[in-house]
Image (tube, helix red, strand yellow):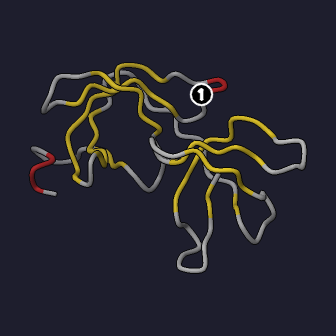
Amino acid sequence: LLLRSERSPQECCGTVHSTAPDGRVYVQVDNGRRLLVDPRPANTAPAPDVRLSEGSRLVVLQGGAMVEAVVQRPLGGENGNRHAVRIELSGATVDYDVNGLNHSALRFDGGALW
């Protein structure tokens, strides 16, 4: 789900996890905070599904920097766009919500060029 704000028509992306009794939805935003959102068109827009293949090389936004990562596997289903990715710098495998605002295919020698 794309979340809109007064500052931007694409403030951030998130994965809908559940619906509150009043019709608002709980959204896990970009690998971080969880928000309760009114899903009206003025506030939200559909975001595309992202399904990356195992072994896909990426640069991902982590801790305010673009770092190299390799997709281990898509988690799919109720996990939305979440993928298990290995962060090349640390070697750690993390669950990462991949969306159009926080990653790019790695198309050159390394993420350090970012």
- Number of callouts: 1
Q: Is residue 109 left or right of residue 37?
A: left
Q: Is residue 6 left or right of residue 95?
A: right
Q: Nearer the viewer, residue 52 or 12?
A: 12
Q: Residue at x 29, y 45 (%)?
A: 62
Q: Residue at x 15, y 47 (%)?
A: 111
- Looking at the rendering, which quadrant does residue 18 occupy? top right
Residue 16, image x and y in percent? Answer: 68, 41
Residue 3, image x and y in percent? Answer: 62, 61
Q: Nearer the viewer, residue 6 or 57?
A: 6
Residue 78, above or below 57 = above
Q: Residue at x 53, y 66 (%)?
A: 11
Identity of the amino acid at label 1?
A: Asn
Q: Residue furthest right?
A: 22
Disc 1: which residue = 79
Residue 57, image x and y in percent? Answer: 27, 34
Q: Is residue 87 left or right of residue 38?
A: left
Q: Quadrant of the C terminus?
A: bottom left
